Amino acid sequence: MSTTTLPAYDDVVARYEPVIGLETHVELGTNTKMFCGCPTDFGGEPNTRVCPVCLGLPGSLPVANKAAIEATIRIGLALNCSIASWCRFARKNYFYPDMPKNFQISQYDEPLCVDGYLDVEVGGELVRIGIERVHLEEDTGKTLHVGGATGRIHGATESLVDYNRAGIPLVEIVTKPVPGTGALAPEVARAYVTELRDVIRSLGVSDVRMEEGSLRCDVNTSLNLPGQEWGTRTETKNVNSLRSVERAVRSEMLRQASVLDAGGRITQETRHFHEDTGDTTPGRSKETATDYRYFPEPDLVPLAPDAAWVAELKAALPELPRLHRRRLQEQWGLSDADMQSVLNAGAVELIEATVAAGATPAAARKWWLGELSRRANETGVELADVGATPAQVAELQGLVDAGKLNDKLARSVLEGVVAGEGSPTEIMTARGLEVVSDTGALTAAVDEAIAANPDIAEKIRSGKVAAAGALVGAVMKTTRGQADAKTVRELILSRLGA
Ligand SMILES: [Zn+2]
């Protein structure tokens, strides 16, 4: 690790211009692998989801997965790409233990989708990110280094290989270089990956979970002096969260600036991002395309998607997330800032589903951004995994609207929901949390409060109605918050003849 003091970020962006680029790999959620019939679900005993094709045994022949081709074309269309009317798979030759065939079937100079764009919003501005290509390939297996402290090969006593993932369809999405974003470069990178993830999720072709590796991102960064040619870029590999995408760009900008400031040169290389420190360290120096000795895959026929089929897929694309969000923002009547907090909390779909289940947008937003967000933060889980479903939140709000729960009781019920005790109605009944508005049941508590506070009662009798609040508070306390405050107030006033 470098011990050089890094320059300040503001100082770096005042003197240098960053150019970023992103390469994203998305594992498709097809039932079977790209070129064989092996199942693709996550997990499973190592090396149980393999066959002669994905193990590359002699004599086996691949057959392309139509569902994967369809998914890739839909991704290309959603990213405004042109779809090739004819293209081929290519062999990318390299030797690595997690790749049983010693080559990967990929696409080289004939990708399935080219020349598109994705618009992302950063700080209220629209930034258009050019898409160079979207192509289809197969994933590698996984290597596990054991016996060492870090899980890395260094210090390990043995290495194990699991081929279950080998051959799962993988879509690679490569942006064009993105210049001109200046100080916002890290945020633009993050916004792009976020938007791309949302687009792909809206297509339903992948679960795009960065923490499970079904969406993986490599970030290219370079710096140049204003008016000069673009600098040499580095590629930061395996950035595993949205936050890390932003940190990786920023960290690489600072590191490169300190090298350039000292009169050094940037080496074109792969670097590894470290979640713990936010630094990057050098990996291997970058291979060039000639190192891979690409050639057309001789075991597969060319891919020639029918124009009518592509048009059909295009016509059936769902509403894309940015437009969808704009429509929801209008429907929910939110300001840009309010919508941004909904987005930041990852609550758009949850609120949408809660509204669909019968709650008002305001009520849905209140629960998801309030109590449930707080809880998700405390327990360190995503809002969607906090333990309450949109239907349960809508049911809870329904009980509030019906006067069966007040705000405080509703929060207690929600605690039970999150703890898995059942539906809001079940929990309300089981825990005896329902609001008491029956005057018979409340009169005793009201009389008790009046007797215990004669001076306040006297004030009310003499016309100072505002003093009733103190007695309402006393009744709420003795009824553990379960009394209906409005009924209690009416009772107090009528008992005291005010
Ligand atoms: Zn297989």
Image (tube, helix red, strand yellow):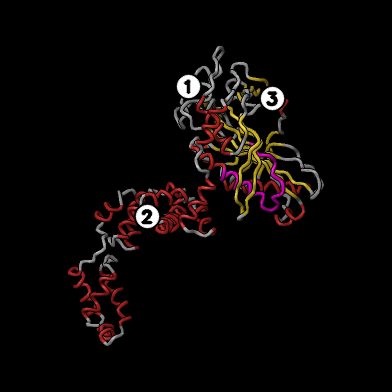
Residue at the limit of the structure toward the bottom, as seen here: 462
Instruction: Mark 2: give few (<14), some (14-19) or many (20+) Cα within 10 Å.
Output: many
Q: Nearer the viewer, residue 80 or 153?
A: 80
Residue for badge 1: 37
Classify mark 1 as within 8 Å of ligand 1 or not, answering yes or no: yes
Amino acid on which the number 3 mark rests in the picture:
Tyr
Q: Please tell me whether mark 3 sits on a helix, a strand or a loop.
A: helix
Instruction: Name the main secondary structure of what is drawn in magenta.
Output: helix
| Residue at the image point whose x is 56% and y is 38% from the top | 78
Q: Nearer the viewer, residue 102 or 167?
A: 167
Residue for badge 2: 359
Instruction: Choose top left, top right, bottom left or bottom right for residue 442.
Output: bottom left
- Asked whether residue 145 is in view, the answer is no
| Vertical comparison of 168 with 184: above or below | above
How far apart are the alpha carbons under marks 1 and 3?
A: 27 Å
| Residue at the image point whose x is 76% and y is 51% from the top | 16
Q: Nearer the viewer, mark 2 or mark 1?
A: 2
Instruction: Choose top left, top right, bottom left or bottom right for residue 271.
Output: top right
- Asked whether residue 225 is in view, the answer is yes
The segment highlighted magenta reads 174-195
Instruction: Name the N-terminal-most of marks 2 and 1.
Output: 1
Q: Position of residue 236 (x, y in %)?
A: 66, 40
Residue for badge 3: 292
Q: Nearer the viewer, mark 1 or mark 3?
A: 1
Q: Position of residue 157 (x, y in %)?
A: 57, 29
Amino acid on which the number 2 mark rests in the picture:
Ala
Q: How many marks?
A: 3
How far apart are the alpha carbons under marks 3 and 2?
A: 56 Å
Instruction: Name the N-terminal-most of marks 3 and 2.
Output: 3
How far apart are the alpha carbons under marks 2 and 1?
A: 44 Å
| Vertical comparison of 287 with 254: above or below | above
Instruction: Name the N-terminal-most of marks 1 and 3.
Output: 1
